Image: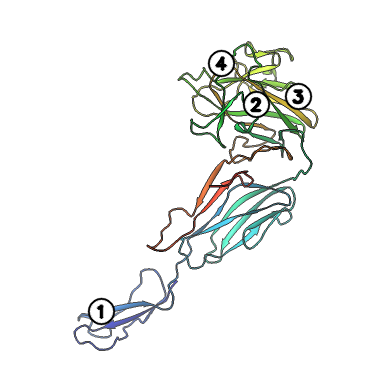
Amino acid sequence: SNTYSVKWFDPRNGGDLKDGSVTTINSDTNVSIGNPPNNSSASWVVLVEINGNISFEVTGVTVTPQDTQILVGDTSELSATVSPTNATDKSVNWTSSDNAIATVDTNGLVTGITQGTVTITATTNEGSFTDYTTVTIIENVTDDCDADYEEKNNIVVIEAENINTGGLWSVETATSGFSGKGYLEWGNGTFLNTPGNGKISVKIKINNPGVYQFLWRTKVGQGSDPTEENDTWLRFDDADSFYAQKGGDLESIVYPAGRGTPNPDAGSIDGWFKVFTSGTLNWTWSTNANDHNLSDIYVQFDSAGVYIMEISARSDFHFLDRIVLSKGIADPTNLSHVETPCSGSNNNISVTGITVTPQDTQILVGDTSELSATVSPTNATDKSV
C-alpha cells in the first residue's frame, strides 16, 4: 500500500498548510482523513499527497502456455503475466513439482530431464498469487524413423491435413472449426461398395503393443442429412486384429469381411470397415462401425513395429480433421495433445491454437505495452503470427 500525507489550507485567511488530527494515511482503501486543525464548521481545503512514488498492487498472475510437451533434453520458455499490467512489482518465483523430471530457472525456462509429467508454478513475490501449467516430458528418439507417425506414451495423434495423399484428396479451410491448418476433403465421387479409390497409406510406428481405440474427428461436408456424406473406408490389414465392439460386450465384436467372423450386416469388404459418424452435421469424434449396432473401433498390435493404416474414399465431402489411436488415455480427443510424427520423418507439426496475453489491458496515450502471442503446441513447425 501507499503512504499519503494530509495537510489543510484555510482558503478565507490564507497562510501555510496546517496539520489536522490525521497527518499520515497508510492505505489505498477508504479511510478517514481526520478533522481540520480548528473550527471544523469553517471552510477548509484538504490536500492529500502521496509520499514517494505511487505503487500498484498485484492482483493475480497467468502462466502460458498451458499443458505443453517437450522432449527430454529440450527447453521451453513459459511466460508469467502479472495483473494488473501496471503493477509495481511484477517479479515471480518459478518452481517445479519434481526437479528430477524437469527444472525451471528464474526466467521460466523449463528443461526436460527425464520422461514424466510435472507442474510448473509461478508465484508472485507480492501477494503470493499463483498459477501453474502442466508440462509433459517425452522421450527423445534420435534414430531416423521408417514411419510417418509414431505412438508416444500410448497415443498417436495425426492432423489429417498433414498426411501425404499424393494429391488425391484436397486440403481445405473453408469450413470453420477444424484443428490444425485445415482438413482433408474427398470430392471425386462416391464408392459405397468399392474401397480402394483415393487410397491413402500411412505408416505408424507402435512402441508399446496392446489394443488401441481408433477415433477420428470428422464432419458431414454437404447436405442436411447426418446419415449422408458421413463415412469413409478404413483398414489396418497388417495389425494382429482389427474389430468393432459395442461397449464392454465381448459378444458384440465383429470383424471386417474377409478377416474373421462374425461380420457386420453391411459396411465391410475385404478387411475394410465403413467408418461413419452418427447423429450430427457438426465436427464430431463419433467414430462407428456396424450400422445396426453402433460400435467403437479397435486395433490390436501384439508386438512393437511399423503398421499400415489405410484410408479410402466412400462418401463425397466427408471431411477428415484429426486421427487418434490411444491406449488407456483418459482424454484422447483433447485437442491439446500434440501431433506425434515419427522422429526423423518430414511431417510438419500443425498449430492447434494461440493465446494472447495480457488480456483486457490499458495504456496511456503515447505509452507502449508489449503483448505476447503463445502458439500451441510448443513444438509447432510454424510459430509465426
**Of the residues under marks 3 and 4, which one precedes in the sequence?**
4
- Work out which quarter of the rendered image holds the N terminus and state it: bottom left
Q: Which residue in the protein does label 1 denote?
A: 45
Single out the mark in the foreground, 1 or 3.
3
At 56% from the left and 16% from the top, the residue drawn is 189
User: Circle 1 sits in a helix, a strand or a loop, which is it?
Assistant: strand
Q: Position of residue 282 (x, y in %)?
A: 49, 28
Q: Which residue is mark 4?
A: 189
Closest to the observer, 339 or 188 = 188
Look at the picture and state if 358 lies above or below 256: below
- C-alpha gap between disc 2 and disc 4: 17 Å
Spatial CA distance of label 1 from label 3 is 88 Å
Image quadrant of residue 298?
A: top right
Image point (19%, 84%), residue name: 12
Above or below 147: residue 37: below
Q: Is residue 130 left or right of residue 253?
A: left
Mark 4, mark 1: which one is toward the viewer? 4
Q: Circle 2 sits in a helix, a strand or a loop, which is it?
A: loop
Of tags 2 and 1, the one toward the viewer is 2
**Label 2, label 1: how far apart the Cα atoms are:** 82 Å
Left or right: residue 38 versus residue 385 is left
Q: Residue furthest right?
A: 303
Q: Are marks 2 and 1 in contact (CB under 8 Å)?
A: no
Q: Which mark is residue 371?
A: none
Task: Give the x, y percent position of residue 53.
Answer: 44, 75
For marks 4 and 1, the one nearer the N-term is: 1
Residue 114: where, in percent of width, then height? 75, 50
Comparing labels 2 and 4, the label whose residue is closer to the camera: 2
Q: Earlier in the sequence, mark 2 or mark 4?
A: 2
- For label 3, the residue is 239
Q: Position of residue 93 (x, y in %)?
A: 60, 63
Q: Identify which residue, 358 or 67, lies in the foreground.
A: 358
